[in-house]
Structure formats: C-alpha cells, structure tokens
Amino acid sequence: MPLLADIAKTIRSKNAGVDKITFDIIFQDKAAYDLVRRSGVLSRAAICKLYGIPDSRISDHVEFDPGLAIKFTMYRKLPSGSLGDADVFGSQQYGPLLGVEVPLD
Amino acid sequence: MSATQTTEHCRSNRGLRILCPNGHLGFAPTKLGSFELGVAAEPDMIACDSGSCDCGPVPLGSDNSVSPLAWQTHDIEAMLVGARKLAVPMMIGSAGDTGTNSRVDRYIGIVRDLAKQHDIPRFKLGYFYSELTRDTVRSRMAAGDTVRGLDGRADLTAAELDATDRIVAVAGVHPYIKLLDMGADVIIGGRSSDCAIFAAPAIRAGYPQALAYFYGKVMECASFCAEPYGAKESIIGEITMEDVKVTAMLPEQRCTIASVAGHSMYERSNPYYEYFLGGHIDMSQCVYEQFDERTTRVTGPRFIPADELRVKLEGAGKVGERYVGMVGVRDPYTISRIDDVIGWAKSQVRERFGKNGYQLSYTVYGRDGILGELEPLRHQPAHELCIVVQGVAPTKAIAEEVCMIGTRQMFYARLPNVKGTAGGVAFMLDEVMPASAAYRWTMNHTIRVADPMELFPVHMVEAGV
C-alpha cells in the first residue's frame, strides 16, 4: 500500500497562534487529493487515532478544494514554548503522517 | 503617496502596488536580487511585517529580539534606500519580532542612523506603540470588562494577569491609516495584524475592505505564496476595485493557483477565515486564476464586520531562571527503564529541595522528545537516547543545582539488573548550561475597545539630513 509521503506534495505542521498547531497535507493534482480524501485515512477519527487524542483536541478539519489540501488543527497540550514543549514552532509534529498507508480502492 | 495620488489610483483603477521583501523582517536576511527587481518595477509602496508569536514567549517576556541587530539593519537599509529613491512610503509592522515599545524605538534608531549614513533628505517618520500595562488591563477588568480567552483559553483571571510580565495589543489598520493621513514617509509599527500593514493603504485609497484585507493576507509572507519554495524573496501585489494580483519577483519563482491558494491556509487554523480588529474575511468563495506566467489573480473574498471591537492581547510571564543539561544512553536495558532512571534523578532533587519551588523537565529524544504524548512510536525507543534536562527555579543558583542534580543523578541511577555499574549515562559535557529564563504565554485573549485607536498612540518625528 502506498504511503501518504509517496502521494502528497507537501506534508507540514506549524503553529496557528500560541495554543494550536495546524497540519497541511497538499496534493499535486485532484486525483491524488480525491483518492486520499475518499479513503478516510485523514478523517477526524483517523487523525485522533493516529495521534492518540480525543476528538475535542481537534479544532478544525477542512477539505480545502482550492488548495487541493486536507487541513486540520489541534489544540496544544501546553502553549508553545512552555517548559515541557520541545517544538516551539510546531514544525515537526507532522512526522507520523508520512507513514500513513493509503488504500488504492 | 499623497491622499490625492491614492484617490487617483482608485479612480483610474490603475491599482495600488506594494512590494513586500520579507515575511518576517530580520529573522533571516532579505534576498537583495529579487528585491532590486521589485524596486525597478516602481511599486507605490514598500511594506513588510517583522513580528511573530512563533518564536515562543521568551522574546516578549524578556523584551528581546530573536533576530540579530545586523540582519534587522540589513533589511531596513534595503527598504529605506529603495523607498526613498522612489519617493514612496515604507511601512514595517510588529517591529523587532514582538512589536513592544523598545523594539519600535530600536527600529526608529536604525532608520535615523541609516538615513544619516546614506545622506537621505529629511522625511517624516511616523510610529505607533502597542504595549499595554498590567494596570490598564486591571482597571478595565475592575470596570467590568471581561478579557476573553481565545483558542479554548479561559477568560483572564487576576492571578494570570499578575503572572504576566509584558503585554502587547494587536493593532488593526487604524494607526497605519492615521499615520499615512499625517503624511508619514516611513512608518514603524508596534504589534499589529500581519494583514493590516497592506490592507491599511488599500482601504485608505478607497478599495473594498474585503479585497484589501485579502490583499494583506496574501502579501504578508512575501515569497511564501510562490513556488518553487524559496523564502525571503520579494513579491509585488496589486489591488484594484475588482481583484488582487500577486507576482513573484525572483525569476525562478511563480505565483501559481496552487501556491497562492496553498498560502491562504498557512499558519492558520482554518483556510477560509482571517480575523483582525474590526472583523474578518471569508475566503470560502475566492476564485484563483493564473493571470500570467508568474502572477495569480484572486477575486471573491467577503468582509464581515465585527459586532463589537475586540483587540487581541498577547502576554508572556516569567516562570524562572533556567539551566539545561544533556545525557546520552546506549545500554538497551537502561533505555527500557529510562523512566525509572529519570524517576531516581527526580527523587534526588526532591531529597535536596523538597517537592515545590522549582520545576524539572525531561525531554527524551529517541523516544518521544518532539511529539511527547502525541508520538505513536513512543513504545519503540531508538538504540540510543539523548535526554535534555531543564531545571527552572526563582534564582540562577537554585536552577543550576536543580538541573545539576537532575542530570548527574541519572549517572547514578539504581536499576536492579544493570550490567554497567560504572555510570548509567554518557556525558558529552559533565556540566549544566545557563539558558534563557523560562517564560510562558499567559495571555492569548481579547479586550473590548470603543475606538480602534485607543490602545495605539501615534507619533511623528523627522529623520534624514
């Protein structure tokens, strides 16, 4: 089964303000975007399972057609830069997404 | 640009064109090649943002910049020389990363020095402050105002306000418009919404607010809205009565539908909405078109005015002085019991200092250092680990000792079946290092205002020779 890293053009995470981290998964073309969107591997429930968080931690989950992107945002456990937060910019939180398996049909 | 000129732009629908050299002035130096191409295209204005709360609470709390003075000067110099050569306004928002008063003053000083150095004829230098005292917030709370929490935060309490060392309010377009009205040639802004810097001259010139704020949103990160990826390159955006067009200045870059639409989701919870003082824009009906090889055209954003004027407040408070230690572990048995090793070291700190009055934090790289509890692979640690220890306490002396015990006692951890009894961890340095004091974000809130200018006093001076 192909991995999300093989299919998506961009997979990134970044702060959205001091209390949230936002994730963007951007695709090269509509076919790839639709494939992943329909597969459900990046649904709210799938994200919660992957990161081990309750649904209440997700503030937004959007399929963004103009950008051929799936985007979701989660509340941080601690505000950025607090003692115990080791990713002040939130820029490496996307790691687990790279290995998500995408079924082809 | 004079008021007559801006009205002229609007009437002739020639468009207002702004050159943006950098998405965060000073954080990494502006690339001058594409900037000079931008200046040669004769924009009506040169503007950029210089702030971010991405760098964490330390710069705001300690009133410092994360950007080196040399880089700030380098970037301001290019803008100032370019703008004065063209005789067009230059604007910088959120001076010096945080937009505090000291950062505005620093930029004013840099502009004055550069103006002298380059023999620039006298010009009007406008600026505004964004800092807010605790007393101001306290008296508003006492008068019955609720300081509302954003992003799931509770409303501000007196205790959290007391724990705050420094507060900035986030300005909208209003102080920029005011300073342009006053004839400023150069504007240095305190903390403000990124989009306000570009939206302000567009709104002042009479363009629709929806397009003006969208214009600001798309411009504020410079070449981040272009592809292939390449930061710190210049772009030029044009707003007309009908659309916004954005063009990459670096010959190798293009503003494409994908790159511009993609940028509208960058660093924000939701790609469809952008909030600022006075309202928000809804971008869900935006239409993106490839206008020419390097330009994308956008139409269709909508502006929704706010029912109540609320200003965003950012606040940071000191937690304590901080020291940092580091150890490595290679023994698989010790790795499998790393929490016990940490537990032992913590118990030794407790023995010396008790349970309270300090904080001790362990980050275990090679297991879950970066994601913490979000790490799906935290039960499969690597064959070697690096553990970073942070000790935080009211004084440097206590922080150092907390950190030292918390680090060195990992060496002496008592594991029942360990083979290596000559040292439980590896030291690259058998010492702990002083770090910046620890701060935290105490405020991510909003406060009600009657007038959008009331927290942002404007000033005008002269600079040049």
Image (cartoon, coloured by chain):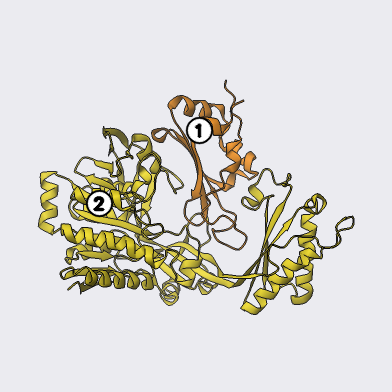
Chain colours: A orange, B yellow
What residue lies at 52% left-to-right and 74% top-to-bottom?
B162
Residue B272 seen: no
For the residues beneath circles 1 and 2, the answer to whether they share a chain is no
Disc 1 target residue: A8
Amino acid type of the residue tagged 2 in the rendering = Glu
Q: Quadrant of residue B230?
A: top left
Disc 1 to disc 2, C-alpha distance: 35 Å
Quadrant location of the N terminus of chain A?
A: top right
Q: Quadrant of residue B342?
A: bottom right
Query: Which labelled disc corresponds to residue B237?
Result: none
- For marks 1 and 2, give the one nearer the viewer: 2
Amino acid type of the residue tagged 1 in the rendering = Ala
What element does badge 1 sit on?
strand
Disc 2 target residue: B36
Q: Measured along the vertical axis of the image, is residue B268 above or below residue B197?
A: above
Chain bearing tag 2 is: B
What residue lies at 30% left-to-right and 44% top-to-bottom?
B250
Dot 2: within a 10 Å radius of its alpha carbon, few (fewer than 14), some, or many (20 or more) residues? some
Q: Are marks 1 and 2 in contact (CB under 8 Å)?
A: no
What residue lies at 63% left-to-right and 45% top-to-bottom?
A53
Q: Residue A26 at x, y = what percent? A: 46, 36
